[in-house]
Image (cartoon, rainbow, N blue to C red):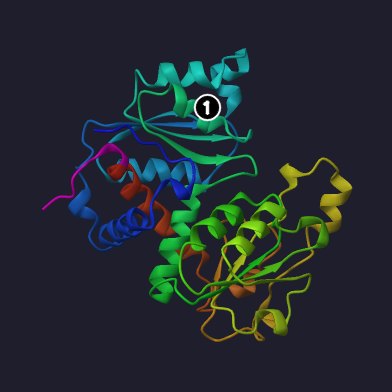
Amino acid sequence: MVLRHLMSPLDLTVEEMDALLSLAGRIEKDPKKYAHVCDGKRLATLFYEPSTRTRLSFEAAMLNLGGTVLGFSSADSSSAAKGESVADTIRVISCYADIAAMRHPKEGAPLVASMHSLIPVINAGDGGHQHPTQTLTDLLTIRELKGGFDGLTIGLCGDLKFGRTVHSLIEALSRYDGLRFKLISPAELKVPSYVKASLKTKGIPYEQSERLDADTMAGLDILYMTRVQKERFFNEDDYIRMKDFYVLDREKLAMAPKDMYILHPLPRVNEISVDVDDDPRAAYFRQARYGVYVRMALIMTLLGIEEPA
C-alpha cells in the first residue's frame, strides 16, 4: 500500500473526496457495522495547541472503529517542551502508532512531519493555513443538508483572514460547478489576496461586504459563521475592537432565507446568539457530529481498510 497523508483537501481528487463523503454517510447510517474494522490499530493525537472538538472527535472516531488512542494534548506535555523537533517526534511516534493526527500553531509543521513519517499523517490544523478534516466535515454537512454542492451560494462571515477553516473550505468547494461566494468581514480581516486570486482564475464569482444584513443574506444557501480568533492577534486592543463585529441573533436571522442553513466550525464566542440554537436552520451542532463520521472514513481510507461486507 502507498503511504498517503492529508495536508490539504486538495490532496484528494474530487472523486476521492466524493467517495470518502459517501463512506462517511454510510457510517452515519450504520455505525455498528464499522465497530471493529480498526481492531489492533493505534491513532496518535499530536496536539501542540488547545483543541476540544478536533482532538476528541479524532479519538471518538478511532474508538468507534475499534482502535485505540495515544498522544498528547499540548506542547507542554510533550518533549517539544525540551526542544525536540517535529521531525524527531514523528519518527518516534511512527514506532508506536499506525496513523497520526497533528495540530500545530506553525504553518507547515504537519507537512514537515509527513516528510519524516513512516505512518499516515493527518493535518488537524496548522496555524492560519489549513484545516482539511474540518473542511471534510463542512462538506459532508452541506451535502447532507442540501443534497450536493453545484450551484450553491455560500456566505462566509467573520475572520476570513486568519480562519484556516475558511481557506480550506473555499479551496475545496471551488472544484464544484456553479458556486458563488459572499465574503463578509471587517476590512482588517478580509480573505487573503491569494484566495481571491484563485477564485478569479477559476472564474468563480464572489462579492465582498462589511455588513451582515438582509441584502447580504439574500439568496444564501449556507451562512458559515466564524469567530474572531484572539490567539491570532498580536494586539489585544484590535481583538477587542473586532470580536463583536458580527452577532447573528434572532432578529438578524428573521431577514435570512427560510431554506438557509447556519454552519460554524466552533467554538463560538459571541458571534451566534444562543437564541438562534433552536432555529431549524442552526446546523452547527449537527456539523460537529458529522465530524466524527468523516474522521472515521478518513482513518479507514488512509489505512487502506476495506469496508465490511
Identify the residue at the far right of this view.
237
Q: Residue at x 49, y 57 (%)?
A: 172
| Magenta stretch bounds | 302-309
Q: Nearer the viewer, residue 274 or 50?
A: 50
Q: Which residue is mark 1?
A: 112
Q: Amino acid at mark 1?
A: Val
Q: Is residue 233 left or right of residue 217?
A: right
Q: Nearer the viewer, residue 79 or 179?
A: 179
Picture coordinates of residue 282, whole percent (x, y): 54, 72
- Quarter of the image with the N terminus in it: top left
Q: Is residue 91 left or right of residue 165?
A: left
Q: Nearer the viewer, residue 116 or 286?
A: 116
Q: Residue at x 42, y 58 (%)?
A: 289
Q: Main secondary structure of the magenta part?
A: loop
Magenta stretch containing residue 304, yes or no?
A: yes
Picture coordinates of residue 262, whole percent (x, y): 56, 71
Magenta stretch containing residue 248, yes or no?
A: no
Picture coordinates of residue 99, whole percent (x, y): 35, 32
Q: Residue at x 49, y 45 (%)?
A: 8
Q: Is residue 134 left or right of residue 217?
A: left
Label 1, secondary structure: give it. helix
Residue 73 shows up from this direction: no
